[in-house]
């Protein structure tokens, strides 16, 4: 019975859509201004998708001008959606918010407009689409994050999920917002529930989330058993995937390490292209063809345990070594990572993980979970998690923070190093922009060589 009702509803919906599209075509043949405003909007979208943003802006504003001056009664929310996207791309967040709010205000799908009478052609998805109505809520959530209005951000994120409970982007956004509210545990639990639900409904199989690895518990076990980690030989590890960073980034990182440690080490580069690497760098093939930062997860596989030393020291390519790092390489715990609270672009996310540097005990077999769980369920997991750092948070609790163990030795460029290099700093992080290649400060020329 319910299936029959759903089928009838779907057919009725399709009939109404076809009717509105037909009515629009008739109206277009009668009204030159309507034809122009739609044409300019489409041209603006083409230029936007081609990343010709100035031309896109010209045509989108022309479309809006015709609509407002010649067709003031026309309900045309899609144009505001496209302008919102344009201003968001320009990082003019206030203007983007202004237009996204107009999408909601004017949309034929807004229940507050249910008493308003529309012309049949105004129900056309070329003028007012349900996708634009939903996406405007999603985008508002992101824009409000950008300007620091967390309450509004979560409000529109929840509204998106109310409109479309299966909206994956909003679930991802909600996880980000919860972290910024200091609710990391809630964000983690919500993401696991999304993965479990998707697995059951779409793949018809039960997914059982893994138990988080408690690093402090493992560290205490080492202390009780008087287990010392052999740091006589260290594995220095980096990952180079794709074309964002060339071989010179790897070589400069290697030279920085070489100048700033007295420890014996092997320098490994896990990569899909080892061309141009210094002869002293040991190239290793990436086990999986996982894009971007997901290649880091393969470092926790059993195959990666063939590396020479017992202690692994991973470091991102966009880092500069500025001082002796021997004491970092003598870390005696099982897993240490950067705290997001000391990184300018992530300061809202307190006590989160930033994997620009990871130090871990290669013999801690529990850490293999980071790779194994992802390997078995990669397509599901990466639907709901867009950052490797979040994946680490979901698998590891109570990690050691590098900034706590080695105060002032790992510094964020934007937060601490723009004017001059702090005296105690050994490693400078460039997590987003600028990058070392931009040479934003004079001191970089002395160390990034």
Image (spheres, rainbow, N blue to C red):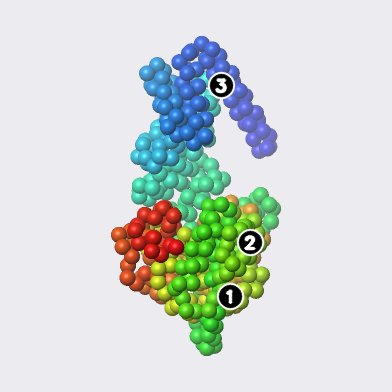
Residues at marks 2 and 1, CA–CA distance in whole angstroms: 18 Å
Question: For mark 1, does the 10 Å Cα neighbourhood hold few (<14), some (14 to 19), or many (20 or more) residues?
Answer: many
Q: Which residue is drawn at 47% across and 59% down?
A: 318
Q: Nearer the viewer, mark 3 or mark 1?
A: 1
Q: Which numbered disc flags the more N-terminal residue, 3 or 2? A: 3
Q: Which numbered disc flags the more N-terminal residue, 3 or 1? A: 3
Figure quadrant of residue 181: bottom left
Question: For mark 2, does the 10 Å Cα neighbourhood hold few (<14), some (14 to 19), or many (20 or more) residues?
Answer: many
> Mark 2 — residue?
286
Q: Which numbered disc flags the more N-terminal residue, 2 or 1? A: 2
Q: Residue at x 49, y 36 (%)?
A: 51
Q: Residue at x 40, y 44 (%)?
A: 143
> Mark 1 — residue?
362
Taking the image as shown, residue 123 lies to the left or right of residue 93, namely right
The location of residue 42, given as percent across then percent down, is 51, 26
Which of the pair 176/449 is nearer the observer? 449
Q: Is residue 447 among the parts visible in the rendering?
A: yes
Is residue 272 depicted above or below 407 in this figure? above
Label 3 secondary element: helix
> Mark 3 — residue?
20
Label 1 secondary element: loop
Is residue 432 depicted above or below 21 in this figure? below
Query: Which residue lies most toward the top here?
Result: 30
């Amino acid at each position: 019975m319910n299936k029959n009702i759903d089928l009838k509803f779907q057919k009725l919906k399709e009939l109404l859509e076809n009717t509105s599209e037909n009515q629009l075509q008739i109206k277009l043949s009668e009204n030159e201004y309507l034809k122009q405003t739609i044409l300019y909007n489409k041209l603006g979208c083409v230029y936007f998708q081609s990343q010709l943003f100035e031309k896109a802006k010209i045509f989108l504003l022309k479309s809006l001008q015709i609509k407002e001056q010649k067709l003031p009664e026309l309900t045309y929310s899609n144009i505001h959606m496209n302008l919102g996207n344009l201003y968001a791309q320009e990082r003019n967040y206030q203007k983007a918010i202004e237009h996204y709010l107009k999408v909601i205000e004017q949309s034929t799908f807004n229940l507050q407009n249910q008493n308003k009478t529309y012309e049949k052609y105004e129900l056309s998805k070329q003028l007012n689409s349900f996708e634009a109505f939903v996406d405007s809520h999603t985008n508002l959530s992101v824009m409000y994050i950008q300007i620091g209005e967390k309450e509004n951000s979560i409000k529109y994120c929840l509204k998106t999920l109310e409109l479309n409970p299966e909206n994956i982007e909003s679930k991802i956004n909600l996880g980000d917002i919860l972290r910024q509210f200091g609710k990391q545990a809630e964000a983690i639990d919500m993401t696991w529930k999304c993965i479990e639900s998707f697995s059951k409904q779409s793949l018809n199989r039960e997914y059982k989330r893994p138990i988080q690895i408690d690093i402090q518990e493992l560290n205490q076990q080492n202390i009780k058993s008087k287990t010392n980690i052999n740091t006589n030989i260290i594995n220095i590890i980096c990952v180079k995937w794709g074309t964002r960073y060339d071989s010179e980034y790897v070589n400069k990182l290697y030279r920085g390490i070489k100048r700033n440690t007295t420890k014996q080490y092997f320098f490994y580069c896990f990569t899909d292209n080892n061309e141009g690497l210094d002869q002293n760098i040991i190239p290793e093939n990436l086990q999986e063809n996982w894009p971007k930062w997901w290649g880091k997860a393969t470092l926790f596989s059993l195959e990666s345990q063939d590396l020479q030393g017992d202690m692994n020291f991973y470091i991102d390519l966009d880092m500069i070594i500025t001082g002796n790092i021997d004491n970092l390489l003598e870390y005696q715990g099982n897993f240490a990572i950067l705290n997001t609270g000391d990184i300018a672009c992530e300061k809202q996310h307190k006590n989160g993980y930033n994997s620009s540097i990871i130090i871990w005990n290669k013999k801690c077999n529990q850490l293999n979970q980071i790779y194994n769980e992802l390997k078995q369920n990669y397509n599901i997991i990466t639907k709901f998690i867009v950052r490797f750092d979040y994946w680490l948070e979901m698998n590891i609790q109570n990690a050691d923070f590098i900034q706590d163990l080695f105060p002032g030795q790992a510094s964020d460029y934007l937060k601490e190093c723009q004017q001059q290099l702090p005296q105690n700093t050994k490693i400078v992080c460039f997590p987003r922009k600028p990058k070392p290649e931009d040479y934003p400060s004079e001191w970089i020329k002395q160390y990034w060589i």
